[in-house]
Image (tube, helix red, strand yellow):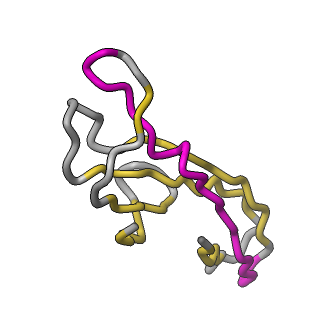
Amino acid sequence: MEVDAINTGRLATEETIFLFVHDLVSTVARPLLELKAWAKVALDPNQSKVVAFTLPAESFRVLDENFESVLEPGDFYIHVGLNRSQRRSKIPA
């Protein structure tokens, strides 16, 4: 997946873009948001860059009640943003 990082300010900056996954239904308790990837990007004033993330199927695995790693079917949302509280995108996966 790709997202646009844009610096609308007047100064150069570095930002860290975070990607979280939310499992809508799981057979075991999971965190509301799980950090799966991040990228640091340097931006000059008024510059934009495309930030690309790849999530392999392993990113969606969970430990079941027997502590075995399983890949459950289900619906997930992917959230992308500067931090957990400033998520900018919510994408069904």
Viewport quadrant of the C terminus: bottom left
Q: Nearer the viewer, residue 29 or 20?
A: 29
Location of residue 33 in the rendering, given as x and y in whole percent from the top left corner = 34, 44
Numbered-mark total: 0
* Bounds of the magenta segment: 45-66
Residue, x 48% and y 61% (percent of image)? Answer: 81
Is 22 on the left or on the right of 34, as rendered? left
Is 1 on the left or on the right of 29, as rendered? right
Q: Is residue 77 above or below residue 28?
A: below
Q: Is residue 68 above or below residue 59?
A: above
Residue sitting farthest toward the top: 66
Location of residue 92 in the rendering, given as x and y in whole percent from the top left corner = 35, 70
Quadrant of the rendered structure where residue 1 is? bottom right
Residue, x 19% and y 36% (percent of image)? Answer: 27
Q: Nearer the viewer, residue 35 or 83?
A: 35
Location of residue 8 in the rendering, given as x and y in whole percent from the top left corner = 62, 80
Residue, x 79% and y 62% (percent of image)? Answer: 42
Residue, x 41% and y 51% (percent of image)? Answer: 21
